[in-house]
Structures are given as structure tokens and as C-alpha cells.
């Protein structure tokens, strides 16, 4: 960078001592030739980067080719502007070197930001890294690049960096006191990135709040969650440090827990039904038999004899889970019907007393009362 500045200063000094019209023509010609040569070289470099199986060379190329185009134009035009300014207004000519240096810093910053953006795409889409972590690191790198750019611009403009940093420390304390909620959300996001209770794409819910949906973005201030009816929820990150968050996306299995009742008249068939239902679950290809699997006669219900099934599916996919559960319940129906039993439903038995018996009962109650 320093060598580039020295070369630019040498060119400026040369322009000051030469015929300005000739110098303008020479500088424009050199700029055009350099731009054309760069475009020819760029096309070859682009094909070379696209022909390799590595994607990092494409990221470097993506980061550099546009900033270099503009850098050639900015340097050439700044030299031309120097010649014109010397002839028209020497005071303006003194500002051009500062503008040129700032432009170079901006081009380098632009290249760094483009590289970070392309690197995020490579890591997430092609190397299948954790999207939440990649985005968090990308945001930190962007903030660092922008801060370094601002410090470099201040240094070029003649500000004391040490003084700026000292003022920034005092200003940071004042801002921290005034923006307590903002900082709490920032550190809440930092905790999410470090602890990783959820990531982008996870299904989360909170029993403490009316929060349930798919995480779409984890920002530095808020996290955006898309509910199942497609409404966006914007939740301040500080809230996640004080509530319970469930992450169903990370469950290892899904549970089937059902209670089934048959008629009291089919009590003799209960044992064989329970045994065959358990055997069916143990042989089902979508049931994980390494997990808890229970089928037991459970209770005497008001109008049924109840047995329950308790088992886990291998899949955690919500749609496939319901397909497996439907298949299990249909097979239970087939087992019950195969043994001539029926499922119970709420019933009521009404005992009717004959007229003579009712009168006798009333007389007995009367005598007891006396």
C-alpha cells in the first residue's frame, strides 16, 4: 500500500513539471491500455478459476475483479484531475491525494466485503457448514472491516487514532448506559451464537410465551421466526436468556402414545390382543425397538377396558411420522377385529323396576322411616 502511494506521488510530481495537455493525454492512454489489458487478463483468470474444483479461488476472484476495475479508473482519473487542478486551482490539487488514498481504501474494503459474502455462500451451500455460525462470523468480520476502514480514513485525514480510540472508550461507556436494551439484545445474540440452542431453519417453541415456528434469521438485535400460519415474529434476543426454549428439530425420535378401549364383553380377548399388538410393533420397520416399547392392559374405564401403546418411531419428520402412526393404528384396528372384538364407546345401562316391585320397595322404605 505504501509503495502504491509513493508511486502515485511520483506520478503527481512528474505531472507538475510536464506540459499538462501532453500529460493528460499520456495518463488517459495509459489508463485505457491498463484497463483493456486488465479486462483481457480478467477473462482468462475467470475461466481458470471456474475450471478448478476448488471454490476458494472463485471467492478470491469474485472479491477482486470489480474493485480492480474501479481502482484502475480511480487512479487514472485522479492523476488527470491533478493536472487540471494544478492549472486551474492549486488549492484543490492539494485535496486530490487525500481523495485518492480514501478511494483506494474504499476499494480494498469493498473487496474484503465481497470476499466475506462469497465465503459465506461457499461454506453454507457447498461445504454444508452450520449456517448460523457462518453468518455470525461473517457479521463480525464485516464489522471489523468497516471499523478498520474508518480508522484508516481518519488516519489519512490527519486525525489521531489514539485520541479517537480514547474518545471511543469514553463514548462507549456513555452509549452503553443510554442503550442498555440494545446491548442486552446484542449480548443475547452472542449467547445464541455461542450456546447454539437453535440455528436458522430449526423449529422452536416456548411454553413460557406464545412462540412457535421456524427460525429464519438471527440478527444482532432481533431473531425472526416464521410461525406455521406464515406470520413473522420479531423477538428481541434478550428474551431468550429468560425463557425456556424447546427445539423439536433436534429430537432423536417421535413418540406414539395412545390409549385404546375395547368392550367389557371382550375381556377374555384382551390378553391375546395386547400380545399381538406388541408383536406387530416389534416387527414394524418404522418402529425403533431399541427404545421403550410397551403394550399393556392399563385400566377399567367407565365403559371400556383400556390398554395403551407406548413406542417411538425411527423418523423425526413430521409428515412421515403421521404416516407411520396411521399405519400402526390401522393395524391395531385389524388385530382387534380379527379376534371378533369391538372398540368401546360411551354407554349407559338403565335398570327398569317393575310396578309391583316398586310399590313393595316404597312400603319397605316407609316402614324403615317409621
Image: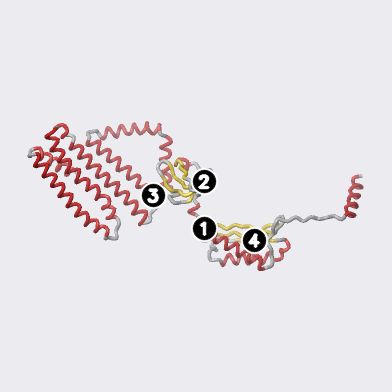
Distance, label 2 to label 3, CA atoms, is 22 Å
Q: Residue at x 46, y 45 (%)?
A: 232
- Please name the residue shown 43% across and 50% down the image: 200
Question: For this view, does 287 lie left or right of residue 237?
Answer: right
Earlier sequence position, callout 4 versus callout 1: 4
229 displayed left or right of 92 = right
Work out how far the residue at label 4 is from the one at label 1, CA to CA, in angstroms.
28 Å
As drawn, the label of residue 336 is none
Classify mark 4: residues with Cα within 10 Å, few (<14), some (14-19) or many (20+).
Answer: some
The residue pinned by badge 2 equals: 206
Can you tell which quarter of the image residue 322 is in?
Answer: bottom right
Which of the two discs, 3 and 1, sits closer to the camera?
1
Colour mode?
secondary structure
Q: Residues within 10 Å of mark 1 (few under 14, many from 20)?
A: few
Which label was assigned to residue 319?
A: 1
Q: Can you give x and y, in whole percent of width and height, for residue 344 in the image?
A: 69, 59
Mark 4–mark 1 CB contact (< 8 Å): no
Q: Earlier in the sequence, mark 2 or mark 3?
A: 3
Q: Mark 3 sits on what residue?
A: 133
The residues bearing labels 4 and 3 have C-alpha atoms spaced at a distance of 46 Å
Residue annotated with mark 4 = 296
Q: Quadrant of residue 52?
A: bottom left
Q: Earlier in the sequence, mark 4 or mark 3?
A: 3
Amino acid at each position: 500500500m505504501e509503495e502504491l502511494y509513493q508511486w502515485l506521488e511520483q506520478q503527481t510530481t512528474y505531472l507538475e513539471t510536464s506540459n499538462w495537455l501532453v500529460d493528460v493525454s499520456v495518463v488517459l492512454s495509459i489508463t485505457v491500455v491498463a484497463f483493456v489489458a486488465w479486462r483481457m487478463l480478467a477473462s482468462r483468470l475467470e475461466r481458470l478459476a471456474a475450471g478448478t474444483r476448488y471454490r476458494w479461488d472463485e471467492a478470491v476472484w469474485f472479491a477482486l475483479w470489480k474493485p480492480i476495475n474501479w481502482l484502475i479508473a480511480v487512479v487514472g482519473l485522479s492523476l488527470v484531475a491533478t493536472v487540471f487542478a494544478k492549472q486551474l486551482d492549486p488549492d484543490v490539487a492539494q485535496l486530490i491525494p487525500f481523495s485518492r488514498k480514501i478511494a483506494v481504501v474504499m476499494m480494498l474494503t469493498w473487496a474484503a466485503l465481497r470476499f466475506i459474502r462469497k465465503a459465506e455462500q461457499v461454506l453454507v451451500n457447498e461445504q454444508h457448514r452450520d449456517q448460523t455460525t457462518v453468518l455470525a462470523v461473517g457479521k463480525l468480520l464485516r464489522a471489523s472491516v468497516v471499523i478498520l476502514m474508518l480508522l484508516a480514513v481518519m488516519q489519512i485525514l490527519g486525525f489521531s487514532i489514539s485520541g479517537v480510540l480514547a474518545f471511543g472508550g469514553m463514548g462507549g461507556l456513555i452509549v452503553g448506559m443510554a442503550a442498555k436494551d440494545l446491548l442486552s439484545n446484542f449480548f443475547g445474540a452472542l449467547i445464541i451464537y455461542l450456546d447454539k440452542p437453535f440455528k436458522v431453519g430449526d423449529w422452536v417453541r416456548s411454553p413460557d410465551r406464545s412462540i412457535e415456528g421456524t427460525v429464519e434469521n438471527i440478527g444482532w438485535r432481533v431473531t425472526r421466526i416464521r410461525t406455521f400460519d406464515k406470520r413473522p415474529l420479531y423477538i428481541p434476543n434478550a428474551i431468550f436468556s429468560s425463557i425456556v426454549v424447546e427445539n423439536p428439530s433436534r429430537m432423536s425420535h417421535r413418540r406414539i402414545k395412545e390409549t385404546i378401549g375395547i368392550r367389557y364383553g371382550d375381556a377374555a380377548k384382551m390378553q391375546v390382543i395386547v400380545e399381538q399388538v406388541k408383536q406387530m410393533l416389534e416387527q414394524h420397520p418404522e418402529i425403533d425397538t431399541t427404545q421403550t416399547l410397551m403394550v399393556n392392559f392399563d385400566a377399567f374405564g367407565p365403559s371400556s377396558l383400556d390398554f395403551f401403546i407406548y413406542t417411538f418411531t425411527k423418523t423425526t419428520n413430521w409428515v412421515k411420522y403421521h404416516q407411520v402412526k396411521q399405519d400402526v393404528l390401522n393395524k391395531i384396528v385389524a388385530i382387534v377385529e380379527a379376534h371378533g372384538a369391538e372398540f368401546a364407546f360411551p354407554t349407559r345401562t338403565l335398570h327398569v323396576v317393575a310396578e309391583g316391585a316398586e310399590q313393595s320397595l316404597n312400603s319397605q322404605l316407609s316402614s324403615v322411616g317409621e
